[in-house]
Image: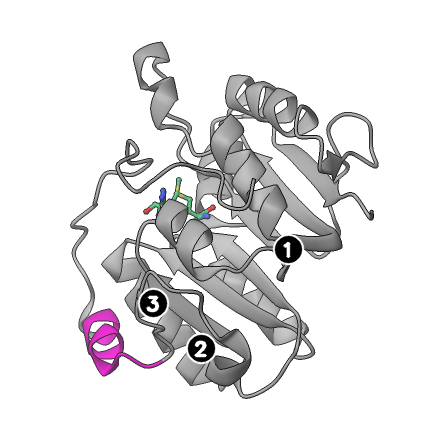
Amino acid sequence: MDNPGGDSAHLKSFVLRSGRMTPAQTRSYETGHYLIPYTGEPADFAASFGNNKPVTVEIGFGMGRATAEIAAANPDKNYVGIEVFKAGIGKLIWEAETRGLLNIRIIEHDAVDVVQKMIAPVSAAAFHIFFPDPWPKKRHHKRRLIQKPFAELLASRLCPGAYVYFVSDWEEYAQSALEVFSAVPALTNPHGGFAPPLEWRVQTKFEKKGLDKNHLVREIYMERVKT
Ligand SMILES: C[S@@+](CC[C@H](N)C(=O)[O-])C[C@H]1O[C@@H](n2cnc3c(N)ncnc32)[C@H](O)[C@@H]1O
């Protein structure tokens, strides 16, 4: 399928948090720096970054702490963060500007639409999904990001050998995500089940919250098959 994932009438995997912004976050947000507007058309990331470095896409970066750290440590790669939370977007712009990071861009929109419409098939080097909203109540499971159509969509956007890295502290969501990813024919699991933590992964705000409640952190690392 060239465009799995359905149309943009899907149930949203987020509730817009109004969250008070600090003056610095507001100022940074208002600069519009680093933002790629949502167009609904395939994005030309080489033009946005001014180079052809491989592009990792992070979905739901929250306050962007991991995004900025990982981007700073990997200047040979580009990072596109997708988020709808304005305070977090302001924070990541502030962070990127303060640290002089050249390899970050941000799209403020629903990631399901962005991946489907703006990320070309067989183009991404990786997807990072760190601590997505778990939607713990059974009646809300349909809002979870990782369900069959979106997992297939992610796989379709990856280059051969590229990866999806999903981390969650919600055991039942992690189990369900492992099943969903394992059933995508275009993905393979080099670890068989859950993966060991990758040493370069940075602790995020929501990871800290989970650890403070003694939650177990589960990691899933899937690769796009090389055909
Ligand atoms: C639980 S928070 C985790 C944030 C961060 N990754 C962390 O670990 O601290 C999930 C984030 O994903 C964002 N999010 C959820 N669904 C999204 C979607 N469809 N498109 C863009 N962002 C989304 C939410 O706004 C929220 O900031």
Residue 56 falls within the magenta-colored stretch: no
Would you say the residues marked 1 and 3 are in contact, meaning their CB atoms lie under 8 Å apart?
A: no
SS class, disc 2: helix
Which label lies toward us, 1 or 3?
1
For the point 49% across and 59% down, which residue is it?
Answer: 119
Badge 3 amino acid: Lys
The label shown at residue 91 is 3
Direction from residue 10 to residue 63 in the image, left or right: right
Label 3 crowd bin: few (<14), some (14–19), many (20+), radius 10 Å: many
Magenta-highlighted residues: 24-33
Q: Position of residue 201 (x, y in %)?
A: 65, 53
Vertical relation: 33 (above or below) 210: below
Of pointers 2 and 3, the one earlier in the residue sequence: 3
**Mark closer to the observer (1, 2):** 1
Q: CA distance from mark 1 to mark 3?
A: 23 Å
Residue identified by numbered label 2: 96
**Does the Cβ of the disc 2 residue fall within 8 Å of ligand 1?**
no
Residue 64 at least partly seen: no
Q: Which mark is residue 166?
A: none
Query: Which amino acid lies under the numbered mark 2 shown in the image of this protein?
Result: Ala
Residue that lies at the very extreme toward the front in this rendered image: 1
Residue 126, numbered circle: 1
Residue at figure coordinates x 31%, y 12% from the top left = 139
